[in-house]
């Protein structure tokens, strides 16, 4: 087992990215998409794993056993991933049978062109900025290779500045939102998925041109609920060794709610955040709910 070294962030197309990804960029940029690929795209911590599990269950016709064939990170490879001692996302995808499912956290301007040339479908999941900040902070603590986030207040400032891996949440959610009608993109919200998972699963089915009975939709919603996924070792990242992902203090499947930010933001942090948010979101009609 290669013990990971602390991840260094370097600018790539104007976005702070892990040096391992930047060094491997050519192979990602030249990735050959297929027209039947399905991409799950998110800013980190917006519900990637949840959406991935739902989509894999849809592709498996609701058959849970099929979804337990492998871990979520093998069933839905991470396009730009480059983790020492493991096959890269591009290598995994090269041998994955079609139709391929894949995930990415790339801002839209960094997506390999072939996805647009092939008109591949993308499900984008967005989550409110405050809950993402909290979730990302805890994630930095459990992923051994991630940069030290420092204390919460320091991390929050860096996050607001876009000075974290994958850069600015604002640019990410707005970038994908603005282009959603130019490409084959279904734009969903984590909070909507929490509020009514079956409704959002049906949106996915419609987008994927698939039809399923209410019973199967119910089954998918049940098996992809937070409590069930938390105990499913094929979905909860428990199979990743402690040296890479240390879940002894916080689980990857941490809380899975909308509004946990209220337990972490001070009044002053919240006021500063809201002011900044207003300014940075003044040029869009994209609207988020930070509680439901
Ligand atoms: P929290 O840290 O707020 O709990 P990603 O998969 O993009 O890394 O996102 C991880 C976040 O999604 C974590 O948020 C995790 O708990 C939450 N999550 C994962 N599966 C979920 C589910 N089935 N329902 C709700 N939230 C889920």
Image: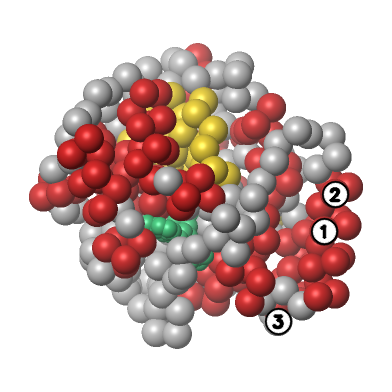
Secondary structure found at label 1: helix
Question: Which residue appears at 37% of the width and 18% of the height?
Answer: 35
In the image: residue 195, left or right of residue 16: left
Provide residue 27's location: percent of width, then percent of height: 48, 36
Q: Residue 29, image x and y in percent? A: 54, 32
Residue linked to disc 2: 278
Color style of the picture? secondary structure
- State the image coordinates of residue 123 (x, y, percent, origin top left): 46, 33
Lower position in the chain sequence, tag 3 or tag 1: 3
Left/right of residue 169 with respect to residue 234 in the rendered view: right
Quadrant where the C terminus sits is bottom right
Q: Which mark is residue 274?
A: 1
Q: Where ligand 1 lies, by quadrant? A: bottom left
| Cα distance between the residues tagged 2 and 1 | 6 Å
Q: Nearer the viewer, residue 238 or 8?
A: 238
Residue at the spot 39% in from the left edge and 84% down from the top edge: 248
Apparent side of residue 222 relative to residue 152 in the rendered image (left or right): left
Which residue is rendered at x = 33% and y = 28% of the image?
Answer: 205
Q: Which residue is mark 3?
A: 151
């Amino acid at each position: 087992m290669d013990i990971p070294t602390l991840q260094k962030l370097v600018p790539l197309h104007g976005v702070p990215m892990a040096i391992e990804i930047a060094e491997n960029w050519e192979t990602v940029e030249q990735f050959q998409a297929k027209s039947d690929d399905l991409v799950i795209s998110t800013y980190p911590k917006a519900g990637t794993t949840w959406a991935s599990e739902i989509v894999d269950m849809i592709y498996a016709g609701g058959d849970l056993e099929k979804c337990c064939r492998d871990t979520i990170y093998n069933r839905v490879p991470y396009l730009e991933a480059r983790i020492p001692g493991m096959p890269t996302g591009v290598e995994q995808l090269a041998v994955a049978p079609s139709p391929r499912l894949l995930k990415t956290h790339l801002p839209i301007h960094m997506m390999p062109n072939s996805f647009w040339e092939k008109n591949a479908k993308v499900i984008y999941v967005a989550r409110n900025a405050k809950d993402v900040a909290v979730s990302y902070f805890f994630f930095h603590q459990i992923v051994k290779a991630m940069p030290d986030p420092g204390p919460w207040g320091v991390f929050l400032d860096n996050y607001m500045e876009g000075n974290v891996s994958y850069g600015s949440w604002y640019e990410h959610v707005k970038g994908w939102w603005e282009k959603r009608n130019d490409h084959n993109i279904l734009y969903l919200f984590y909070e909507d998925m929490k509020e009514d998972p079956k409704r959002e699963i049906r949106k996915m089915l419609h987008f994927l041109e698939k039809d399923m009975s209410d019973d199967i939709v119910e089954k998918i919603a049940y098996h992809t609920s937070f409590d069930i996924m938390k105990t499913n070792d094929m979905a909860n990242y428990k199979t990743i060794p402690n040296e890479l992902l240390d879940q002894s203090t916080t689980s990857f499947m941490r809380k899975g709610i909308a509004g946990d930010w209220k337990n972490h933001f001070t009044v002053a942090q919240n006021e500063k955040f809201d002011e900044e948010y207003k300014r940075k979101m003044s040029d869009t009609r994209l609207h988020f709910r930070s509680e439901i």
